[in-house]
Image (tube, grey):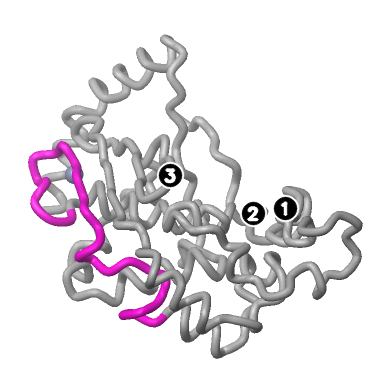
């Protein structure tokens, strides 16, 4: 099957590249998700947890790997993460639109997670970098009751001919989401439509130095860049490489 897809792509490669060039000429952004070199895709706590979570489902197990090579080949473009939704364009034998809808956490579910984590997450930096105690890690990554969505909560749509279930384009996008979390772990909470600061306990007291009440949990982009500097260094910024 793989070689046929590859052949299709080769046959249509020029046409697809012509379309991309035409769109760029019109001023459209067409930006590839850059995968790091090396064996691992995601490198951060949230990126890896996302990947591990999805790979643990039998529904996805056989189909996900095809997405890895697609992502590595730089075929995922314009990946955007919103509340409960991921959109991207994937280049195969045509340019396909992938829309992945993820059911938001219900209020009682979020409340339950907050209750279980109460008093155990001191700062947003700890949370976003995954520097968490075993108890919190267990709560967050629990397959049934944690923060990550189950396949039944994930609705995948791709306009390719192989759109039943998880096609390789959508699989590539799911892996791409993990890379986005590497660069900005806050996007995980955006996707789940919850405010990560609600998981913090006594954040202001714990940091203690902020002059303005309630601002202790707010960290600047520079802090994040510093924190994730090593990982970000391994992931080149998005570059137009075609
Ligand atoms: Zn598809």
Q: Secondary structure at mark 1?
A: helix
In this rendering, is residue 31 above or below 197?
above
Q: Determine the residue positioned at 35% across, 13% down.
A: 22
**Counting residues from the N terminus, which is met first, the one under dot 2 or under dot 3?**
3
In this rendering, is residue 180 above or below 153?
above
Q: Determine the residue positioned at 62% across, 63% down.
A: 197
Is residue 70 shown left or right of residue 188?
left
Residue 162 location (% of width, % of height): 9, 46
| Residue at which label 3 appears | 82
| Residue at which label 1 appears | 225
138 or 119: nearer the eye?
119
Residue 210 location (% of width, % of height): 88, 60
Residue 189 location (% of width, % of height): 50, 58
Residue stretch rendered in magenta on the structure: 142-166
**Counting residues from the N terminus, which is met first, the one under dot 1 or under dot 3?**
3
- Please identify the quarter of the rendering in which residue 166 is found: bottom left
Q: Nearer the viewer, mark 2 or mark 3?
A: 3
| Residue at which label 2 appears | 232
Are the residues flagged by discs 1 and 2 in contact, CB closer than 8 Å?
yes
């Amino acid at each position: 099957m793989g070689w046929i897809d590859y052949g299709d792509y080769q046959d249509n490669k020029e046409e697809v590249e012509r379309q991309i060039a035409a769109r760029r000429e019109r001023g459209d952004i067409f930006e590839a998700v850059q995968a790091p070199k090396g064996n691992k895709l995601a490198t951060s706590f949230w990126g890896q947890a996302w990947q591990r979570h999805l790979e643990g489902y039998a529904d996805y197990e056989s189909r996900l790997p095809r997405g890895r090579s697609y992502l590595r080949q730089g075929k995922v473009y314009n990946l955007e993460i919103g509340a409960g939704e991921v959109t991207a364009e994937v280049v195969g034998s045509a340019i396909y639109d992938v829309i992945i809808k993820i059911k938001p956490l219900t209020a009682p579910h979020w409340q339950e997670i907050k209750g279980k984590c109460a008093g155990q997450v001191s700062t947003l930096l700890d949370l976003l970098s995954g520097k968490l105690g075993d108890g919190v890690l267990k709560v967050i990554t629990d397959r049934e009751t944690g923060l990550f969505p189950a396949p039944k909560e994930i609705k995948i749509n791709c306009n390719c001919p192989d759109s039943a279930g998880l096609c390789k384009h959508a699989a590539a996008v799911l892996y791409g989401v993990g890379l986005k979390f590497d660069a900005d772990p806050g996007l995980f909470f955006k996707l789940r439509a919850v405010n990560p600061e609600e998981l913090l306990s006594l954040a202001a007291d714990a940091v203690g130095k902020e002059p303005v009440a309630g601002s202790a949990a707010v960290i600047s982009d520079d802090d994040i860049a510093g924190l994730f500097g090593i990982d970000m260094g391994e992931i080149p910024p998005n570059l137009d490489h075609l």
